[in-house]
Amino acid sequence: MAGRARKTYALLSFGLWQQRDDISRLLDAEIVAWPFALPGRIDGFIGWGRKASGRRAAWLAARSGKEVITLEDGFLRGFSPGQGEPSHSFVVDRDGIYFDALHPSGLDRLLSRPVTDAAALDRARRLMALLRHERLSKYNNSPLLTPAAAGVPVGRPFVLLVDQVAGDASIAGAGASAASFRAMLEHAAANNPGKTLVVRMHPAAGDRSLLRQAATAMGIEITVPGRMNPWPLLEAADSVYTVSSQLGFEALMADRAVHCFGTTYYSGRGLTVDHNVLSAGRSPASLEQVFHAAYIDYSLYLDLHTRQPCTPEHAVQQAITVRDQRARIERKVFTAGFSPWKRRAMTPFLKGMAGGPVHARSLDAAAAAAQAAEGIVAVWGSDAALPADVPAIRLEDGFIRSRGLGVNLTMPSSIALDGEHVYYDARGESRLEALIAHGGFDESLKARARDLVRLLIQRGISKYNLGTDADLPVVTEGRTKILVPGQVEKDASIRYGSPEIHSNAALVGAVRALFPEAFIVYKAHPDVVSGVRDGGAEPQEADLTVGSGDILQWIGWADRVETMTSLAGFEALLRGKAVGVHGAPFYAGWGLTDDRLAIPRRTRRIDLETLVAASLILYPLYVHPLSGLPCRPEDLVEEISAGALKSPGLAQKLFLCAAQQINRVGVLLRDSRLR
């Protein structure tokens, strides 16, 4: 049987055209721009909601006898409003749109015959419980506060009234108007004596707040809390009042009584107290049935990174990852003296609850701006002093960085965020060291760490993933094979983490003294091999000195690894190799390594799963190479293993070549200033 021919749909706005790839995947259709397409090849028209494109699509479809499709954001939109990031979900409606109760919609059609299958309803219950537990809403960039912390008076019960933006299509579509908000406020005040009237402002309302206008005109006192995640308000309220807001449905999920003064998809079904006659005559439905119809059957979801269709459960987990990573950066970040390339590289990591970072030219400028905005300063590495009068953090590369070297300006996919001491600075306790020494690690987290180690090994992933072949020597049976990974001798990890042995030559000498009969391979650091960094005098006591080959191939060859502070020691631990450590890297001193240097403050004894959970799951920040959005380390490992380096265009190649040469000169000048 021949496959079904793909239909062709025309988009009617530039904003929709910018999302054409997403729309093509959602509809499995060809997408063209109107009017730049032959009418005969078009099967229908696509518009957005009840905006101009939506109205025009309906008009053109009616005139030509073709299909009309209306798109809108789904109920799990993303981290923050706006077009800056892709949507988690969309609704695709061929009958109308869900917020227009004056006309039929696809969601109405679904709810006219609600799902009754027990497994489907159980899936809906699980998803609702997950959304509530994780405090997920349509947008998720508001801080999680208690009502009291957001300004709600303590000691008095309150009812919550949900504001909306004047002129929004969802108000007219609900058969409501500004008068509906006045009636809602009047009813709440009259029927809740002695209770505080708390108004949840819409983020975009501003001066167009209908409830604030009504309260001023009617002389009714209201309390407007600061920006916060809505779930604590919903759960603490005695009841919730709304005209047509989606928060009304979330209030039902929070088991609150909900008064509706407009007609919504969830009103008139036996779940709400309805004050609008348009709700009469609808088919009753349970909360699970309405959720299943709206969130599972009516909504479509795309993976944030690959933009391929996915399940709502997958989309929820990605939303949690984005929200949780960005919640770690509570204040506005002001970077200090970053190069243009580093600014571009760091921007995705430093977007937090207060928005994206601001890049200042100097530490003084960053400190002044951060102080004025109650923000935080970010500096790179351990060499720059932190400002004394404002909060500050240090940034460094993470442990699963990229497919390629940083010195070649390969974009990073993970960074470490720390305080006075980053993970390689053993002069004091880093945040990673504190996690290992004092953190709690339950069995589910350890199981995740075990699975991550297994994935790293299966996919052959390390920090840089250069993928070059190694010419591995054959050694007489019974002779111990030792790999000594070279390091850049002026690197901060040696200066601040290896107080007794400071050079590659001294390290190889120490290893030869410990293992006089062993076959020792010294592998120079890739930055040294490339000529950008100085590796010091070449060790003379190794049996073999090499510069090529992926580090994982050499780790697989070796019986043990001996190092000062190299991350190769950590990667060897993950692969079950014995590791001797002559400095104080983050993975030493916990009972997992043969420590040649005492680290008295590290007294806790841990297993490998604890080390991995702390260093690869809890400590770094990750962004996905495809999207630049926060992701899990597991997602990054899969992408690095599956992806290939994209070949840039000629202009990009020229720019990258010039930038690399500038960066190399900068690195050489910086190293020349170090002792």
Image: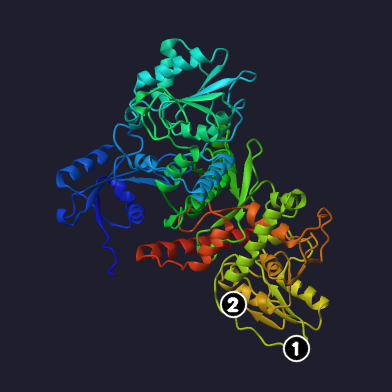
Q: Relative to 279, say whether 486 is above or below.
A: below
Find the distance from the CA under tag 1 to the CA under tag 2. 23 Å
**Tally of numbered discs:** 2
Q: What is the crowding at mark 2: few (fewer than 14 residues within 10 Å), some, or many (at least 20)? A: some
Q: Position of residue 298 (x, y in %)?
A: 39, 46
| 1 vs 2, front mark | 1
Quarter of the image where one finds residue 402: bottom right
Give the numbered dot on residue 642: none
Q: Which quarter of the rendering shows the N terminus?
A: bottom left
Q: Position of residue 597 (x, y in %)?
A: 82, 63
Q: Relative to 57, say whether 512 is above or below.
A: below
Q: Relative to 225, say whether 61 is above or below.
A: below
Whether residue 424 appears in this view of the structure is no
Q: Nearer the viewer, residue 639 or 257?
A: 257
**Residue corresponding to mark 1:** 477
Q: Which quarter of the rendering shows the C terminus?
A: bottom right
Q: Position of residue 151 (x, y in %)?
A: 58, 23
Q: Secondary structure at mark 1?
A: loop
**Residue corresponding to mark 2:** 549
Q: At 30% across and 37% down in the image, what residue appears?
A: 104
Q: Earlier in the sequence, mark 1 or mark 2?
A: 1
- Whether pointer 1 and pointer 2 mark residues with C-beta atoms closer than 8 Å, the reply is no
Q: Nearer the viewer, residue 16 or 181?
A: 181
Residue at far bottom of view: 476
Q: Amino acid at mark 1?
A: Glu
Q: How is the image coloured?
A: rainbow
